[in-house]
Amino acid sequence: MGRLLSPKSFHPEALQTTLREAFNPVKGMDFKLIEGGCFLLKFFHVVDRDRVLDRCPWAYDKNLLVLAPVEASDDPNLVELNHCDFLIHIHGLPLGKMTKEVASFIGNRLGKFKEVDLDRLGEV
C-alpha cells in the first residue's frame, strides 16, 4: 500500500507507469487507486515486493512516496502512511563523537531514531 506525500494532486496513470518502470517487477504488479489519495500495489511475487520495500524510500515528482506492506485481511484505513525510515550518513564527526549516543541524539533531532549500524568492533 502506498501514499504520495504531496500538496498537489497527481495523475494515477502517470504514477502507475512510473512505478512499473522504477520497480521493474519480474512477475508483474497491479496498481489500484483507493480513497484518500492512497493506492494498493499487488506484487505477483514476494521477491519483487521485498526488493521494493528494501529500497525505500522512494520519490515521485520530487515528493516522498510512503510504502507499507499489508495483508489481504488488513483494513487499509488503519494503515499509517505518514512517515518512513531513512538511512542517514554523517560525515566529518570527530572520532570521539562517533558513538551510539551521538548517533541517537542526531537521529532524534532529525526525526525518530531507530537504530545505528555498528561495525564489527562495536563502534559506530
Image: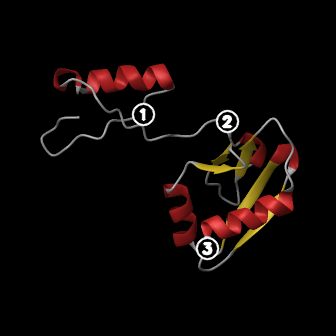
Quadrant for residue 119, please give it. top left
The residue at 45%/22% (across/down) is 108
* Disc 3 element: loop
Residue 59, image x and y in percent? 64, 49
**Quadrant occupied by the N terminus:** bottom right
Amino acid type shown at disc 3: Pro
Residue 118, given in percent of the width and then of the height, sits at 24, 40
The residue that mark 3 highlights is: 25
Q: Is residue 46 above or below residue 40?
A: below
Gap between marks 1 and 2 measured at Cα: 16 Å
Residue 82's mark? 2
- Closest to the camera, between mark 3 and mark 1, is 3
Is 7 on the left or on the right of 103, as rendered? Answer: right
Q: CA distance from mark 3 to mark 2?
A: 25 Å
**Could you tell me residue 47's position as x and y percent?**
52, 71
Q: Residues within 10 Å of mark 1 (few under 14, many from 20)?
A: few
| Residue 94 left/right relative to 116 | left
Disc 3 crowd, CA 10 A, few/some/many (<14, 14-19, 20+): some
Q: Residue furthest left?
A: 121
**Which residue was labeled with disc 1?**
114
In the rendered view, does 77 fall on the left or right side of 9? left
Disc on the earlier residue, 3 or 1:
3
Q: Is residue 28 above or below residue 91?
A: below
Residue at 85% x, 43% y is 36
Do callouts 1 and 2 mark residues in contact (Cβ within 8 Å)? no
Q: Are marks 3 and 2 in contact (CB under 8 Å)?
A: no
Q: How far is mark 3 from mark 1, CA to CA?
A: 29 Å
Residue beneath the point at 52% across and 63% down: 50
Residue 52 tag number: none
Closer-to-camera residue (30/60):
60
